[in-house]
Image (cartoon, grey):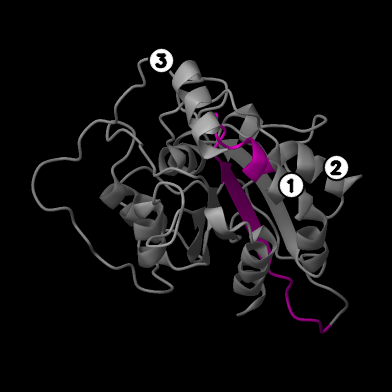
Amino acid sequence: MLWMSLMGCFLIQINPVAPEPEPSGPMPTATVPTGSTGSPTLPPTGDTGDTTTLTGDTGDPPVSQFDLLFVIDNSCSMGDDQEDLASVGPGFLQQLASVDFHIGVVTTDLANAQQAGRLVDSSGVRVLDATTPYPDQVFTGLIRQGVAGSGTESGIGAAYLTEFVNQGLPENAGFRRKGAELHLIFVSDEDDQTPTSVVSLSEAVQAFGGLTPDVHVHALVGIAPTTTVEEGQRYLDLNAQLGGATADISDGSFDLFLDAVVQEILTP
């Protein structure tokens, strides 16, 4: 039951760290134009390394590349949600069979230095692609990040660190490819609480919006007015600026959410 889950959270999370307040004054709300070629004024793009666009037989059009970063809430209330998401992984991967994809996973826990903006692994695999043996099992292992993470869920900060700060770390090697379209997939039953010392919401919009090709933000979070969990307003604000699929995590329709993500990927 929900009250039992919440009691567990209270027992585990002693003295949670409150997020730092947003800077005073009105927050910039600049909408990022589609296909923007400008560079963010913050850190440089996280695209690393040169890759050659893949092609099929002579005369075939180039094969597009897609890098998918799942940002998984691993706080104490997320056990069932992780299991539900992992269970629809095989169908999700099957739908991606026609494209060149990379899948990586980070958690919302910035308090753990070993996880903050660093790709987690499953059976030694940190970057799942079409050549990965036993992909269904690897995907399941990547999504099942447990429930011992910080109660100060900082998904936007985790994505920002992965893309703009920690791209050179060994844990993140090989994930991001130059020219690949980036899809951020946030999964959380609470709102983002990233401290502004890491990145503010407006800075995140500016930084991700400055990447090319376009960045898509998908949010499986609480959505008012019918959600039974905390509304994920900051994730929804980022989604509103950059575009992508959304669904209420309390509905349990994780397969439909991932179907919508696939449509965003496959639709030019």
Residue 237 visible in rendering? yes
Circle 3/circle 1 CB separation < 8 Å: no
Question: Is 73 in front, or is 35?
Answer: 73
Residue beneath the point at 81% across and 81% down: 60
- Disc 2 element: helix
Tell me the quarter of the image containing the N terminus: top right
Q: Is residue 252 above or below residue 54?
A: above
Residue 86 is marked as 1
Q: Is residue 97 above or below residue 159?
A: below
- Magenta-highlighted residues: 59-82
Q: Which residue is mark 3?
A: 14
Question: Is 18 in front, or is 37?
Answer: 18
Residue 137 is marked as 2
Q: Amino acid at mark 1?
A: Ala
In the rendered structure, does residue 206 fall within the stretch colored magenta? no
Residue beneath the point at 65% across and 61% down: 66
Q: Amino acid at mark 3?
A: Ile
Q: Amino acid at mark 2?
A: Gln
